[in-house]
Every structure is written in C-alpha cells, then in structure tokens.
Image (cartoon, rainbow, N blue to C red):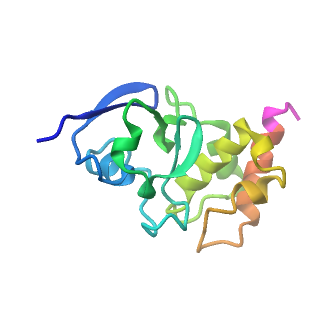
Amino acid sequence: MTEPIRLKLNGKEVDLHSHPMTPLLHALRNEELSPGTKYGCGEGECGACTVLLNGDAVMSCMVPLCQAEGAEVETVEGLCIDGELHPLQEAFICEGGAQCGICTPGMLMSALYFLRQPEKAPGGVREALEGNLCRCTGYTRIYQSVERAIGEAAGK
C-alpha cells in the first residue's frame, strides 16, 4: 500500500489514496472530491478537466497524482464560496455560456487563470480558451461570458 498523497484542494488539506501514477483527474473524481471536474478525452486535448495546479492551468488527465504532492489545486468546486457564485459563474449564467455542462468547468478554470494572469494570453479571451473544446456552441456566448466577468471585475 502506498502512502497517501497530501495536497491542498480548494484551500483545504486533503490526503488522496489513489496510486501515485493515477491521473489527478481520476483521483479527484474517484475519491469524490471534485465531481465537477469532467473527463473529456483523456489525452489533454479538450480542456474539460482543466484545474489550477499551483496557479497554472493544467489538464488534470495528464498530471500524475504524484506530481500534485504538496501542491495547491483549485477546481470548479472552489469557485463558489459560502454559497456565493464567482463572478465568472454568474456571467456564464447571465450570458448563456454554459451549455450541456461537460466543458463548462474547464472553461471556467481556464477563464479564471486568464483573469488572474491576462499577460499569459495577450490575444485575449479567445487565446485564453483555445485549449478548451465545446461541442454544443459556437463559443460566442462563452466569450461573452468571460468578457462580462472581466468588465464587472473592472467596475464597468
């Protein structure tokens, strides 16, 4: 039996008991800590499983759990605090950016990364979300959702 892997998940210390080479996505979902993080392709191509690992957006299907030892991991569940939706979540609701829900958690986490570090995507929202695929929409409402959250954060 392997030692548990300790990390900080949405601000709370947790021990994960999955095998160290289990993808972070599966460990989070199998241990029922982050059912909102979605499995899409399993190959790091669709963005549905995007989480923040030490502040960087990563495809959690490609990260072995052992690489998250001691790390800070943020998932979509961490956006809502004390029942208050994050401005990104509110914007996705208002603008109709959420479709079937498979891509939405990854879109939200990629957008959060962009909001925190806009210099990482000098091309703007479209560049920031280019690693996230959606099969239900033409992306317009998703882009509008992120733009709305940016505007609200800027006090417009």
Residue 126, image quadrant: bottom right
**Which residue sits at x=85%, y=30%?**
155
Residue 154, image quadrant: top right
Number of residue marks: 0
**Which residue sits at x=75%, y=42%?**
149
State yes or no: residue 106 in magenta. Answer: no
Question: Relative to residue 84, is residue 144 drawn left or right?
Answer: right
In front here: 19 or 153? 19
Residue 113, image quadrant: top right
In front here: 108 or 57? 57
**Which quadrant of the rendered structure holds the C terminus?**
top right
Q: Position of residue 135 (x, y in %)?
A: 58, 74
State yes or no: residue 155 in magenta. Answer: yes
- Secondary structure mostly seen in magenta is loop
Q: Is residue 56 above or below residue 143?
A: above
Q: Position of residue 93 (x, y in %)?
A: 64, 51
Q: Position of residue 61 (x, y in %)?
A: 42, 58
Q: Position of residue 140 (x, y in %)?
A: 76, 65
**Which quadrant of the rendered structure holds the N terminus?**
top left
Q: Residue furthest left?
A: 1
In front here: 37 or 93? 37
Q: Which residue range is magenta in the image?
A: 152-156
**Which residue sits at x=61%, y=62%?**
132
